[in-house]
Amino acid sequence: MSTESYSVQTVVIGAGVVGLAVGRELARSGREVLVLEAGPRFGDGISSRNSEVIHAGIYYPDNSLKATLCARGRQLLYDYCTSRNVEHRKCGKWIIATDQAQAERLAGIQQQAGRNGVRLDWADRHAVSEQVPEIKASAGLWSSETGIVDSHGLMLALLGELQDEGGQLVLNSPVLQAETVLDGHLLTVGGEPGVVLRAREVVNAAGLRAPALAGRWAGLPDFARPEQWLARGVYFSYSGKHPFTTLIYPLPEPAGLGVHLTLDLAGQARFGPDVEWISEEDYTVDSGRAGAFAESIGNWWPALDRSRLIPAYAGIRPKLTGPDGGFFDFRVDGPAQHGLAGLVNLFGIESPGLTSCLALAEQVRLALDGT
């Protein structure tokens, strides 16, 4: 029995927050769009396993994609959530130092944020204590632009607009093989029944699986197939009441922003993520890590009750450098990068990917339009 074959203008692979934002953007531009998701539900990957923070764009190097797309994406996201009634809150965050050496590092963070167009207000120990008396800090930076968002509600809104524009989401449809041909791209799609899709345009927004798909993409140059490392971060929720109404971040650490306090929209506190390098996708939460969490948090919140730390969930950051690597940027690899018309690969879309999703979608459209 031969495999059915169909033609479609544009295919987006992956129905996380970035894939849905890209699908919506391309459908609004008048394209016929099909979003393929390997799993049984949209947003089940890294999009549902993060802090749900709307980042201000503080730490990223000058003129990097992370800096520019976070800044634009933040404003687009606040406007979008307001206009579409997606629940969110601009609650702000404190970045705190616990000793003089850390306070000196805060000055560098403030300068970098200023170059990225983000204002951070300096506070000495007394000023921090007035605002968050429970915190032990020698100095702090206040970010008024940081917020939180209902990521599932955001994805529902994006999906609804994709469908309103004539786009479709197809679940349980993993892309098994891909090949670039003269007049487009051939995608072998599994599921029941499996099909071959011929598309003029394809966006690989498969998250953790994007590099693996690129690795088996016939016709894609070897230099356009990046290596990927996985950094798992676990979260612990904090049962019962707590005194916080804003986010609290320690100084950044290698490969992450440190174990920080975030809030959900109901006010529930959670801590994380930490950083653990792993060899394969695994979302296990080791309850034994609570001790290291308690030690870290206790440096700035002495009243922490360790017994109230409850294992919550884990996320995985798709890294383009390993444990010894430094900063890496988002990769939006379009025809200008790899030479294949109508193909965009998205690699290394870790934080601030959620914040940047609408700006990333714009970037993808521009890459496909050749502008």
Image (spheres, helix red, strand yellow):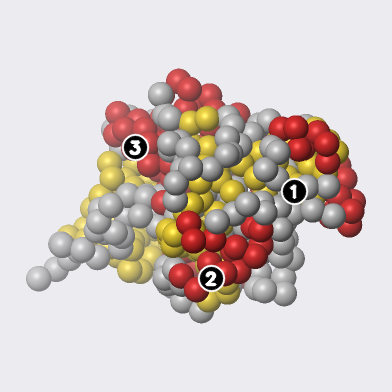
- Taking the image as drawn, is residue 234 in sight? yes
| Viewer-nearest residue: 23 or 257 | 257
Q: How far apart in space, not on screen, are marks 3 and 2 (Cα)?
A: 33 Å
Q: Which of disc 1 and disc 3 is earlier in sequence?
A: 1
Q: Residue at x 33, y 63 (%)?
A: 175
The residue singled out by tag 3 in the image is 156
Q: Which of disc 2 and disc 3 is earlier in sequence?
A: 3
- Which corner quadrant holds the C terminus? top right
Tell whether 195 sits left or right of 262.
left
Q: Which of disc 1 and disc 2 is earlier in sequence?
A: 1
Dot 2 crowding, Cα within 10 Å, few <14, some 14–19, many 20+ = some
Q: Which mark is drawn over residue 136?
A: 1
Q: Marks 3 and 2: which is nearer the front?
A: 2
Q: Marks 3 and 1: which is nearer the front?
A: 1
| Viewer-nearest residue: 130 or 26 | 130
Tell whether 70 sits left or right of 264.
right
Q: Residue at x 29, y 59 (%)?
A: 39
Identify which amino acid the numbered label 1 is placed on.
Answer: Lys
Q: Residue furthest bottom?
A: 279
Q: How far apart in space, not on screen, are marks 2 and 1 (Cα)?
A: 23 Å
Q: Picture coordinates of residue 260 (x, y %)?
A: 62, 52
| Viewer-nearest residue: 40 or 255 | 255
Q: Picture coordinates of residue 200 (x, y %)?
A: 39, 49
Q: How far apart in space, not on screen, are marks 3 and 1 (Cα)?
A: 39 Å
SS assignment at label 1: loop
Q: Picture coordinates of residue 44 (x, y %)?
A: 35, 55
Q: Which mark is drawn over residue 371?
A: none
Image marks 3 and 1: residues in contact by CB distance under 8 Å: no
The vertical placement of 268 against 208, above or below, is above
SS assignment at label 3: helix
The residue singled out by tag 2 in the image is 289
